[in-house]
Amino acid sequence: MKITAALVKEKGAPYEITELELAEVQAQDVLVKIVASGLCRSDYGERNGNSLAFPNVLGHEGAGIVEKVGSAVTSVEVGDHVILSYAYCGKCRHCRAGHPSSCTFWLTVNNQGKNVRGEYVLHTLEEEEVNNFFNQSAFSTYSLTDESNLVKVSKKVDLRLLGPLGCGLGTGSGAVLSVLKPDVGDGIAIFGTGAVGFAAIMAAKLAGCYPIVAIDLHDQRLQTAKKLGASHLINSTSTDPAALIAELTAGVGLPHVIDSTGVPEVMTQALQSVSHSGTFIPLAVTKKHFEVNTFFDLVFGNKKIRGVLIGDTIAKDHLPNLIDFYERGDFPFDQFIKFYDFNEINQAEKDSLSGEVIKAVVVMDQSYEPPRRSG
């Protein structure tokens, strides 16, 4: 079938709204009509040559409506509302242990440009193979994907909002709720207040953390962080965050620290802010490095650095929980989302990179009518 997609023809090229061919539904496949998709920093990285081959169709924060299912599909049916996240095998020991983002075959099914069977599902009208991303390629009007990618959600919530839960917002919240699992009253610091940082702040508030320290360069973002639950704000252009956190905690530091900036100097400050027996989680997608002295930074004080991919959650459980929190007013992520028409995708990325917009969402289906929110 013919679809419309934002094609990236070569490394660094802009998105081009283009007509492509999408493969037919097979037994294990699900065809989803994409309503909207969030833009993530990872999309920008891949557009500029992080790992994928070209041409490709990016997008991995999709949300839409199931239009057709293969004969072997059991968990969703036509008409279901779904969030699209990443693919996983479901059979390796990591998947069986409840850690699908650690799937042994994660790179194969998400970053090789093919579906879980090793097939290209996208082609140009001239029959050139096009790489997909996260087994969803959500920057398109339709996605041919797998059951593992899909999280069924309530039809009572605006689908246009939900895609970012599948990556950025699920990452920040999962790092707190599923990995750090703070006790009530534990302190936490979040370096960088973009979408991932905001999700971590809201999750920390849900968990009963105190203090919740937000660090950023921009006062406007810090004020939003305060509205979302931060108790202390640090503008790092005028203050050394590690020194102020040491002062705030009588030199002890905080048991939980997250960085979403990926800036080496900032990650160093973040690690310096961790208390004895504390944990540092660097979440940013970056090729940059920062230096660690294994004894003085980690061994002395029993400190930990923990890698966390997409929140290390079971998305089919975690994302509906986030929606429940949102419905109760406890996870108000709609406050920092801005919608763009699909053909404005290049501007949406530009505004995201400049910091003008925290979370840009491009809307493919302009005919979609969101439900009215009660209250």
Image (cartoon, rainbow, N blue to C red):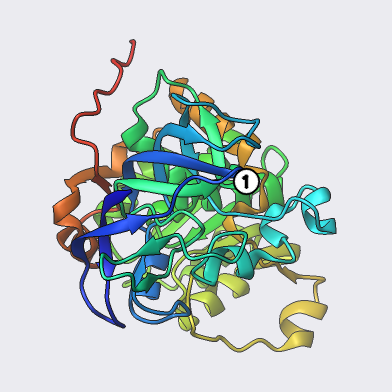
Q: Quadrant of residue 13?
A: bottom left
Q: Residue at x 24, y 37 (%)?
A: 365
Q: Residue at x 22, y 67 (%)?
A: 15
Rendering coords of residue 278 (x, y %): 73, 62
Rendering coords of residue 259 (x, y %): 52, 65
Quick one: quadrant of the C terminus? Answer: top left
Q: Residue at x 66, y 86 (%)?
A: 292
Q: Quadrant of residue 158?
A: top left
Q: Which residue is mark 1?
A: 148
Q: Camera-side residue: 245 or 375?
A: 375
Q: Is residue 252 visible?
A: no
Rendering coords of residue 140 (x, y %): 31, 52
Q: Camera-side residue: 270 or 232?
A: 270
Q: Is residue 26 visible?
A: yes
Q: Left or right: 67 with respect to 344?
A: right
225 up-or-down from 16: above or below: above
Q: Camera-side residue: 369 or 200?
A: 369
